[in-house]
Amino acid sequence: MSPTSNDVIGNEQLNKSEQRPYKRVLLKLSGEVLVGDGAFGIDTDTINRLAAELIEVQQSGIELAIVIGGGNIFRGMSGTASGMDRASADYMGMLATMMNSIALQDAIERQGATVRVISALHIKEIAEPYIRRRAVRHLEKGRILVFAAGTGNPYFTTDTAASLRAMEIQADAVLKGTKVDGVYTADPKIDPSAQRYDTLTFTEALSKRLGVMDATAMSLCRDNHMPIVVFDVTTPGQMLKAISGEVVGTLVQES
């Protein structure tokens, strides 16, 4: 019996799915990428473009969760440097991530996709509380997840929150979207001779202090065999390429 057109389409989709190295990913977005060409805040065109790319990733069959920073609004470390109590500054930073998460949720919903904001701080009027099994169920139902408020604890960065949530939802990889197209031997904006790494081990990244993520986040990924891909999220199309397993940016993993 010859296959029907539906069978052929189904087989093609299955083959595409089998070719993808990742089924479920945790995308860590720097808050600064939302600024666009501005100095601070949220640029409407930028967040709408990011939302469209996130939807494209989700529609390709990837289960997608996101942790977004708040540095475009407030950074806990900068508040501490100005003399604020560290815990108070970090809680303000968590609220900044909540603002970014709601803005991203709105941009995604306006383009027709289903998204849930899950917060480590209990703000039930605007976000669901973090419950691991509920979060996983949202992913299984094809919803985009945005994890807000970091871990809910001061003294922990959103990098650490991204690594922690990736372990909890059993993601296949952490993808870190920044304004730079990978990890370099030095700051390429300052040192024109800086070279980009295609691959790194966690040990190399930590010993050379390359700033991929903070040491706690890196150690967590290393100890749990969670690869990290660092790529330029400001370039259209790079996100889907990175998640699809194309050679984009820098891959950090144990050899």
Image (cartoon, rainbow, N blue to C red):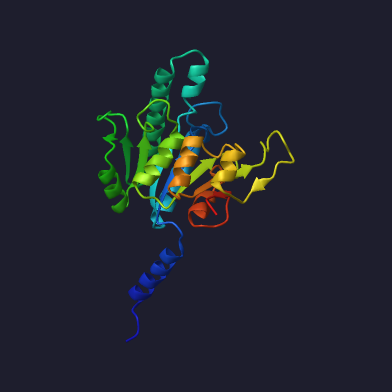
Task: Indicate left or right for 150 with 250 as reference.
Answer: left
Q: Which image quarter holds the N terminus?
A: bottom left
**Residue located 57% across and 36% down the image:** 211
The extreme right residue here reads 193
| 99 or 48, nearer to the observer | 99
Quarter-of-image position of residue 94: top left
Q: Which image quarter holds the C terminus?
A: bottom right
Q: Residue 117 placed where, x, y %?
A: 33, 38
Res. 219 visible in picture? yes
Q: Residue 34 placed where, x, y %?
A: 49, 34
Q: Residue 29 placed where, x, y %?
A: 47, 39
Q: Residue 60 placed where, x, y %?
A: 41, 57
From what the image shows, is residue 88 above or below residue 162? above
| 148 or 73, nearer to the observer | 148
Task: Indicate left or right for 49 with 137 as reference.
Answer: right
**Residue located 52% across and 14% down the image:** 82
